[in-house]
Image: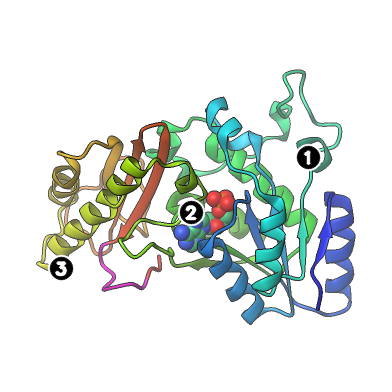
Amino acid sequence: MDMLHLDNPSAASEWCVLQREQGRSLGFVATMGALHSGHMSLVRRAAAENDLVAVSVFVNPLQFNDPGDLDSYPRQLEGDCALVAGAGGSMLFTGSLEEFFPGKLAQDGGLEASAMVDPGSGAEGLEGEFRPGHFAGVATIVKRLFEVTQPTRAYFGLKDFQQCLVVRDLAFAQGKPEVVLCPTVREQDGLALSSRNLLLSDEWRAEAPRIQQALRATRALWQQGQREASILRACLVEGLADSALEVEYAAVRDSLNWTRDEPEGSLVQAVGLVAAKAGEVRLIDNLLLHMDGGVDSV
Ligand code: AMP
């Protein structure tokens, strides 16, 4: 079946609602485009578990706290359409901020404060601290995308760990949709696939796998029986100490019971999280320390 490309949210909404009315299950994948195999793993999983799959491509200005980052974010819609079609997507849609939130734009081009959604406790600390406003932007657009698409299931990548917490809480509060969290897809050398990797120079591309190496060394310490967040974190920090990357945070949290600050006492499950700048490019990654090998799950 050919993939449908719709260029505004109202047309997308009409199509999605019609499919649901006709009794079809709908998987939904939200993206900002410049799609890669990580995104495609979500689309393929959605296609395997639903009758139809809708994909949004929208570089959401509300979640960028750095205007330079927004400007330089890669955009390649034609290639994205081909990839989604190849992975079993049924419909891809785009739209402008104005089209997603008609009549709710503020003077500065952003959104009226009253239209912003509270991202909840998963937004506290780490990404939430280093990217003020980011998760409010995420929660606001994801809530809107859920309204537009009314999906049976929505698929998100664990690469953005705190985003998964925010989206899961949002869906829980609304009672729908079912949120499916998917493992991080990586390059051979461990670097998590990211649209921003396209912006890395050869030198920074060579340095970037240090993040995953440090996370794996920390997981090895967990596997030896270490359960104290402070000691695990020290290992993570040490693993990045001689790297040229500019580390924003290297932290350990309880992956089930999220806290803004480092948890005390012996952990039963844990996640190591890193944000670091490779030159101008900000990279994030994480690893569930209690999971053996490649399987990621909260
Ligand atoms: P983005 O386009 O960066 O907003 O990502 C769209 C979705 O793809 C989010 O749910 C991400 O977590 C997910 N995603 C991004 N990179 C990866 C990856 N390397 N592996 C799996 N999922 C990913």
Magenta stretch contains residue 189: no
Kindly indicate whether the residue at mark 2 contacts the one at mark 3 (C-beta within 8 angstroms): no
Per the image, label 1 sits on a secondary structure element best described as loop
Name the spot of residue 272 as percent of width and height, x first.
28, 53
Residue 274 visible in the current orientation: yes
Q: Which of marks 1 and 2 is nearer the N terminus?
A: 1
Q: Mark 2 points at which residue?
A: 165
Residue 93 percent coordinates (x, y): 78, 55
Q: Is residue 256 left or right of residue 175?
A: left
Q: In this view, does 168 lie to the left or right of 114?
A: left
| Tag in front: 1 or 3 | 1
Which residue was labeled with disc 3? 223
Q: Mark 1 points at which residue?
A: 96
| Badge 3 element | helix
Residue type at mark 1: give it.
Ser
Instruction: Residue at 85% x, 58% y: name it.
Output: 13
Q: In which quarter of the image is the N terminus?
A: bottom right
Is disc 2's CB within 8 Å of ligand 1? Answer: no
State yes or no: residue 294 in magenta.
Answer: yes
Alpha carbon separation for disc pair 1 and 2: 26 Å
State which region is magenta.
289-295
Q: Which residue is drawn at 28% across and 55% down?
A: 212
Q: Where is residue 210 in the image (x, y as percent from the top left)?
A: 25, 49
